[in-house]
Image: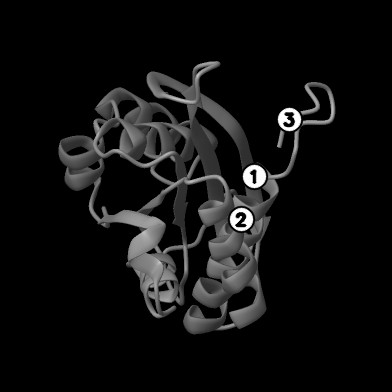
Amino acid sequence: MQHLLSSLAARLQQHHLRLCTAESCTGGLIAASCTALAGSSDWFEAGFVTYSLATKTDLLGVDPNLIKRYGAVSEPVARAMAIGALRRCQADLSVSVTGIAGPGGGEVLQPVGRVWLAWATRDRGTDGAASDNITLNQASSFDFSGDRNQVRNQAVTAALEGCLAALEPDPESGQS
């Protein structure tokens, strides 16, 4: 985990970018992992812990109809959380997580260990200035195994790996 965090920090600093998180089932573990690294104030902007449905709506602007239609643990909600986090702070990259860490709460269609992650970036103009435009990079579903802490820790690792992947150069544009 330390190597992953160090790589992410270096990449964010290299491009003068800042990260924010929007967390549900991890309860702030992604943000805590980031801020455990000395110097994180240079690249970490904010962490939103939106454990309840109301805070997803109130703090991140997730449409309650998305939650009603798809459920809190869903791709549309994870996407809305990632976008909402960027709209509420000055970060350049966001990661969101929503899932069922267990031991209870799972169902046949949404088993314990099901986690949705999404990553979004703030677009930059040709001059490098941040804009209000936000691009959703990716949303992925994971089925982690183990107890509650193992599921949450696996989600943190996947979130950080996805952040690093979101910062990889775009092979089509030749930009990094």
* On screen, residue 28 above or below 22: below
Task: Please rate how many residues cluster around mark 1, counting C-alpha atoms within 10 Å: few if below 14, some from 14 to 19, many from 20.
Answer: some
Q: Earlier in the sequence, mark 2 or mark 3?
A: 2
Direction right: furthest residue:
171
- Camera-side residue of 75 and 84: 84
Q: Disc 1 vs disc 3: which is toward the camera? A: 3
Residue 11, numbered circle: 2
In the picture, measured across the screen, residue 129 lies left or right of residue 1, that is left
Label 2 is placed on what type of residue? Arg
Label 1 is placed on what type of residue? Leu
Quarter of the rendering occupied by the C terminus: top right
**Residue 6 falls in which quadrant of the image?**
bottom right
Location of mark 1 (residue): 167
Q: Are marks 2 and 1 in contact (CB under 8 Å)?
A: yes
Does dot 3 land on a helix, a strand or a loop? loop
Q: Earlier in the sequence, mark 1 or mark 3?
A: 1
Location of mark 3 (residue): 175
Q: Residue at x 50, y 40 (%)?
A: 74
Q: Residue at x 19, y 46 (%)?
A: 55
